[in-house]
Image (tube, rainbow, N blue to C red):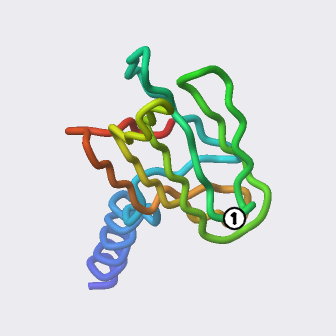
Amino acid sequence: MRFYIIFGITFILLGIIIFYDPYSEYLGVYKDSVNIEYNYNDEDYFWIYEIDNDNLIVKQIDTNKWSLSINNDGITNVMFYYFNDKTNDTKYKINYEFKIKNNKIYWTQGEGKGLLDFPNPY
């Protein structure tokens, strides 16, 4: 009888260990930094970004690629706009929400307007 109880408890614990994912509520989890890259090119438009606080530091690597690194813990929204300076037209708008905690960046939300799909951070 003891054998079956121990086997049952072991089986339950093994199932929890295998199937439990503490990060399942997030779209992505990154350590220390995250990159975002777009491949949309139109000679009249260019990408600009807006960030609502200083929890993440945004560094532009080239015209279509940015690196976001941790500065403080908290929640940060980063907006990217595909903007035409001559006509003041915004073709695409993408909003990312990140939660920063314990040297990890948790991607909590993402929304794109004007696009069928938006690039996933990596």
> Is 83 on the left or on the right of 6, as rendered?
right
Residue behind mark 1 = 53
For the residue marked with disc 1, what is the amino acid? Asn
Q: Secondary structure at mark 1?
A: loop
> Is 31 on the left or on the right of 72, as rendered?
left
Q: Residue furthest left?
A: 116
Task: Please tell me which residue lies in front, 18 or 40.
Answer: 40
Task: Please tell me which residue lies in front, 2 or 100.
Answer: 100
Q: What residue appears at the point 38 percent right and 46 percent down from the top-left corner?
A: 93
Q: What residue appears at the point 41 percent right and 20 percent down from the top-left corner?
A: 39
The image shows residue 4 at horizontal and vertical percentages of 26, 78
Q: What residue appears at the point 49 percent right and 27 percent down from the top-left corner?
A: 46
**How many neighbours does mark 1 have within 10 angstroms: few (below 14), some (14-19), or many (20 or more)?**
few
The image shows residue 85 at horizontal and vertical percentages of 50, 33
Q: Residue furthest front?
A: 87
Task: Please tell me which residue lies in front, 30 or 90.
Answer: 90
The image shows residue 44 at horizontal and vertical percentages of 43, 20
Q: Splitting the image into 4 quarters, where does residue 41 fall?
A: top left
Judge whether 62 appears above or below 51 on screen: above
> Is 106 on the left or on the right of 31, as rendered?
left
Q: What residue appears at the point 39 percent right and 71 percent down from the top-left corner?
A: 13
* Quadrant housing the N terminus: bottom left
Task: Please tell me which residue lies in front, 80 or 3.
Answer: 80
Judge whether 98 appears above or below 65 on screen: below
Q: Splitting the image into 4 quarters, where does residue 53 fall?
A: bottom right
